[in-house]
Image (tube, grey):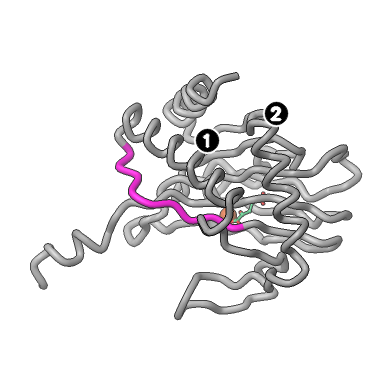
Amino acid sequence: MSDETLFGIIAQDIENKGYSVLPSALPEKLASALFSYQQTMEAEQFKSAGIGRGNEYLENKFVRTDEICWITGDTETGKKWLDWSSNLQRFLNRRLFLGLFSFESHFAHYGPGDYYKRHCDAFRGEANRILSIVVYFNTGWTSADGGELVIYKDEHDQDGIKVVPLLGTLVTFLSEEFPHEVLAANRDRYSIAGWFRVNTSVTAKVDPPL
Ligand SMILES: O=C(O)CCC(=O)C(=O)O
Ligand SMILES: [Fe+2]
């Protein structure tokens, strides 16, 4: 499948239902490059995941226990991923007028027993995270391995839909609309999570003060 075809399916899903779950969707070459990159650097660079970034960085082991590493364009593989993501961003902006302005993403590693409790990636009103994306690198994942992503339709939904974190599966959803969680995994679980943002700093500057 070409990138254009794939991006078109994602756009249609987002338009129709606000989320998209596509098995075997991430291009295989990109997936295997990213996975080996994650494996080689994980020992030295990963750190315990915190909630928020920068000054807001706050480790919160009650909410999430995975380890993360932010992806930059400093390596060939990191750059390939950011190029692919920016093509998706451009496509979605043209097709859905989302006004996506920037992208941030990190590798994540959930060891056995790790989880990320039910949360939203963005909050209505203050949010500049618009679209969340998750891709997985785990071969031969079965239901006995746990670690599913559960996406809830709204804040009242207790059932959700379960996504098996299998190699190549690509998930996108509107960040404000869908609470979600990662159930405890019984084996190592590797992934990337990313967020497309709109630019809020510009409006903050031009908005007259109250
Ligand atoms: O790994 C997943 O399936 C989702 C991770 C997630 O929700 C997050 O990092 O915000
Ligand atoms: Fe999330």
| Horizontal arrangement in the rendering, residue 180 relative to residue 190 (left or right) | left
Q: Is residue 160 above or below residue 116?
A: above
Query: What amino acid is labelled 1 in the image?
Result: Tyr
Residue 19 screen position, x and y as percent: 52, 35
**Nearer-the-camera pick, 73 or 142:** 73
Q: Which residue is mark 1?
A: 19
Magenta part of the chain? 98-106
**Nearer-the-camera pick, 79 or 65:** 79
Q: Residue at x 45, y 57 (%)?
A: 122
Residue 100 screen position, x and y as percent: 35, 45
Q: Badge 1: how crowded within 10 Å, few (<14), some, or many (20+)?
A: many
**Nearer-the-camera pick, 33 or 119:** 33
Q: Check the picture and name the quadrant holding the N terminus.
A: top right
Answer whether residue 46 is magenta in the image: no
Query: What amino acid is labelled 2 in the image?
Result: Ser
Residue 84 screen position, x and y as percent: 51, 38
Residue 143 screen position, x and y as percent: 86, 40
Q: Residue at x 62, y 32 (%)?
A: 21
**Nearer-the-camera pick, 30 or 48:** 30
The label shown at residue 24 is 2
Q: Check the picture and name the quadrant holding the C terminus.
A: bottom left
**Pointer 2 with pointer 1, Cβ within 8 A:** no
